[in-house]
Image (cartoon, helix red, strand yellow):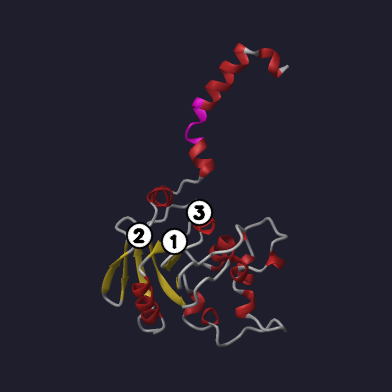
C-alpha cells in the first residue's frame, strides 16, 4: 500500500446522509474477488439508468467532478454491510479521501486498509465544504494528513482522524506489511519450535 500524506484534487459533493455500502457498490458486483474494475460500478444506481446510460445530473458524471479524488459527504457515510468491495470501488474510481461528519466503523477500517483517508469534520463544516465543492472554480481541495488540515478556497480547516489509522496511512503499511517487518523473529521462533518439538513437523 502506498503511503498517504497529501491529497490534492477535485472534491465532489454528496450531501446525502446515511449513504450505505449497498449504494456505494451494489450486491451484483460482489462476485468478483479482484480489486480492479469495480470503479465502473461505483454508485451504480445513481450513475446509470435502467438501460446502462449515464445520468447527466449525477455529480460524478459531470465535469470536473468525474475526475474527483475527494468526496465530501453527509453524516454516517459507509454505514450498512461490511463489504470491502465498497472501498475497492471508491479507490478504483480514483477516490483517495472522504470528508464527512462520521463514518460506518467497519467501512472506516476497510478504507484505512485500502489506503483511503476518512477525514471527520463537524456537520457545519461538511455543509460548508460541500457548498464550496459545488462550484467548479473552487472544488479543488488539498488535504494534508500529517497536519490534519483541509485547504479549500484559500482557507484552511482542521479534521480529525483515528490516530492508529493516521499512522497506518502515513507509513503505507497494512496488516501483512506489519507482519513482514517481524519476519526474522517469526522465522527464529519457527526454527526454535522445530528444534524443541520435531515430531510435530514430521
Residue 109 tag number: 3
Q: Could you tell whether 54 is left or right of 17 in the image?
A: right
**Residue at disc 1, secondary structure:** strand
For residue 146, side relative to residue 43 (left or right):
left
Pointer 2 residue:
160
Q: Quadrant of residue 150?
A: bottom left
Numbered marks: total: 3
Could you tell me residue 66's position as x and y percent? 51, 78
Neighbours of disc 1 within 10 Å: few (<14), some (14-19), many (20+) = many
Disc on the earlier residue, 1 or 2: 1
Q: Quadrant of residue 97?
A: bottom left
C-alpha span from label 3 to label 2:
15 Å
Q: Is residue 33 above or below residue 17?
A: above
Tell me which residue sits at (72%, 67%) in the image. Answer: 28
Where is the C terminus found, in terms of image quarters? Answer: top right
Magenta stretch, overall SS: helix
- Residue 22 % position (x, y): 63, 68
In three-dimensional space, the C-alpha distance between marks 1 and 2, rounded to whole angstroms, equals: 9 Å
Magenta region includes residue 46: no
Report whether 39 appears left or right of 95. right
Label 1 – label 3 distance at C-alpha: 9 Å
Point out the tag, 3 or 2, that comes first from the N-terminus. Answer: 3
On residue 179, which mark appears?
Answer: none
Q: Is residue 119 left or right of residue 93?
A: left
Task: Identify the residue at image location x=55%, y=83%.
Answer: 58
Q: Residues within 10 Å of mark 2 (few under 14, many from 20)?
A: some
Which residues lie in the magenta part?
180-185
Label 2: state its secondary structure.
loop
Task: Determine which residue is flagged by label 1.
Answer: 118
The answer to which of 109 and 169 lies nearer the viewer is 109
Amino acid at each position: 500500500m502506498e503511503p498517504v500524506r497529501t491529497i490534492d484534487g477535485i472534491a465532489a459533493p454528496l450531501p446525502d446522509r446515511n449513504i450505505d455500502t449497498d449504494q456505494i457498490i451494489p450486491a451484483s458486483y460482489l462476485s468478483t474477488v479482484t480489486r480492479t474494475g469495480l470503479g465502473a460500478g461505483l454508485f451504480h444506481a445513481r450513475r446509470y439508468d435502467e438501460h446502462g446510460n449515464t445520468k447527466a445530473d449525477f455529480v460524478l458524471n459531470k465535469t470536473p467532478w468525474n475526475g474527483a479524488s475527494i468526496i465530501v459527504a453527509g453524516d454516517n457515510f459507509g454505514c450498512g454491510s461490511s463489504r470491502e468491495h465498497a472501498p475497492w470501488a471508491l479507490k478504483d474510481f480514483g477516490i483517495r479521501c472522504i470528508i464527512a461528519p462520521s463514518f460506518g466503523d467497519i467501512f472506516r477500517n476497510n478504507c484505512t486498509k485500502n489506503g483511503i483517508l476518512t477525514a471527520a469534520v463537524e456537520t457545519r463544516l461538511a455543509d460548508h465544504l460541500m457548498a464550496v465543492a459545488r462550484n467548479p472554480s473552487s472544488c479543488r481541495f488539498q488535504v494534508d494528513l500529517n497536519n490534519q488540515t483541509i485547504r479549500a478556497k484559500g482557507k484552511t480547516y482542521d479534521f480529525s482522524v483515528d490516530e492508529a489509522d493516521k499512522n497506518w496511512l502515513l507509513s503505507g503499511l497494512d496488516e501483512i506489511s506489519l507482519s513482514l517487518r517481524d519476519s526474522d523473529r517469526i522465522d527464529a521462533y519457527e526454527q526454535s519450535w522445530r528444534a524443541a518439538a520435531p515430531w510435530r513437523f514430521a
